């Protein structure tokens, strides 16, 4: 069976089961803020579906399971050949990205600066300095949930896409697919809320852009480490918003202009883009040296 056919089977399973789950978990279409913590947790269980479908696809297509070598599942962990470096990178880069993104956001929308916003987050000022550490620790502990996504997207989808098409096209295609998978969540306000012009279509487009930019970093650490676990760590830590400056940014104070409404997203996109450019240069350099 061709890699393209295997990929189509995987995507068909993942989207069908995921969308069905999001409907079953939230049949009345409640917004993310409007549902209770229990239902939020129930909906969030959909994160494990991509890796479940990875396993199902390998069973259906009789592809088999390997933890190393060509066509492996990327579920294994190896620290050989300095691969441990990518586990450290996966833990530290989210903090640098989020802090840089918030600096850009404040530069674009200085009105959002609130010297006491951290009080609304029930955080003591002296504890703000520990927020990145807290995010890293909780992200690593909670990485199982992120493994549910990364074990599918980075463990199966991206290796297939990279075989079918050239790297830039594969990364963009993979990012759009990942962004569209979030569409049911974006439509209930999980990612950007519900109060913005063009809801929910603008939010879906923004999610595709974010997933493309984020996906480049996640795919890179997966390929270089030979494991999805660095990507799972990076994903989970990013979800924890590891930023000190976050305690001083109140988005409710943003002016009702394009920059004011989108400063946070633009800041994040530019910060991710800067890292992605560095990653692509390193990636190309690695490939040239390996081919030499």
Image (cartoon, rainbow, N blue to C red):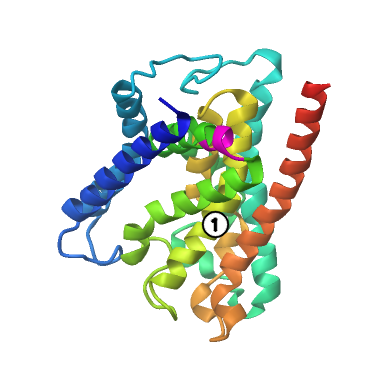
* The stretch drawn in magenta includes residue 104: no
Q: Quadrant of the C terminus?
A: top right
Does any portion of residue 242 appear in the rendered image?
A: no
Q: Is residue 163 magenta?
A: yes
Q: Position of residue 43 (x, y in %)?
A: 26, 50
Of all residues, the one furthest to the front in this rendering is 1
From the top left corner, tell me how far across and down residue 99 is, in percent.
Answer: 65, 55
Q: Is residue 285 above or below residue 68?
A: below
Side of 120 where 274 appears, left or right: right
Residue 106 higher or lower than 163, as above or below: below
Figure check: 277 above or below 251? above
Magenta residues (range) = 161-165
The image quadrant where one finds the N terminus is top left
Residue drawn at point x = 43 percent, y = 78 percent: 196
* Most common SS among magenta residues: helix
Q: Quadrant of residue 259?
A: bottom right
Q: Residue at the spot x=53%, y=86% of the render? A: 256
Q: Name the residue rendered at 21%, 65% in the picture.
A: 29
Q: Horizontally, is 147 left or right of 20 in the view? A: right
Disc 1: which residue: 210
């Amino acid at each position: 069976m061709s890699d393209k056919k295997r990929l189509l089977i995987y995507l068909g399973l993942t989207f069908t089961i995921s969308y069905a789950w999001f409907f079953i978990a939230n049949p009345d279409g409640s917004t993310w803020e409007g549902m209770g913590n229990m239902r939020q947790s129930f909906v969030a269980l959909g994160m494990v579906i991509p890796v479940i479908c990875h396993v199902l696809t390998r069973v259906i297509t009789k592809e088999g399971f390997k933890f190393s070598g060509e066509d492996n599942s990327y579920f294994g962990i190896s620290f050989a050949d300095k691969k441990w470096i990518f586990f450290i990178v996966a833990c530290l880069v989210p903090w640098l990205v989020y802090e840089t993104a918030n600096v850009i956001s404040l530069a674009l929308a200085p009105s959002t600066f609130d010297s006491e916003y951290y009080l609304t987050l029930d955080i003591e000022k002296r504890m703000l300095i520990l927020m990145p550490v807290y995010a890293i620790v909780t992200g690593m502990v909670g990485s199982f949930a992120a493994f549910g996504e990364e074990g599918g997207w980075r463990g199966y989808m991206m290796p297939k896409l990279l075989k079918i098409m050239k790297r830039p096209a594969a990364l963009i295609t993979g990012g759009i697919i990942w962004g569209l998978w979030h569409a049911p969540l974006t439509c209930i306000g999980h990612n950007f809320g519900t109060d913005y012009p063009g809801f929910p279509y603008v939010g879906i487009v923004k999610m595709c852009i974010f997933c493309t930019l984020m996906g480049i970093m996640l795919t890179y650490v997966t390929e270089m480490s030979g494991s999805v676990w660095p990507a799972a760590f990076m994903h989970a830590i990013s979800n924890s918003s590891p930023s000190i400056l976050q305690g001083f940014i109140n988005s409710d104070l943003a002016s009702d202009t394009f920059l004011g409404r989108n400063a946070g997203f633009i800041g994040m996109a530019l910060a991710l883009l800067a890292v992605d450019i560095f990653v692509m240069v390193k990636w190309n350099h690695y490939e040239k040296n390996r081919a030499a």
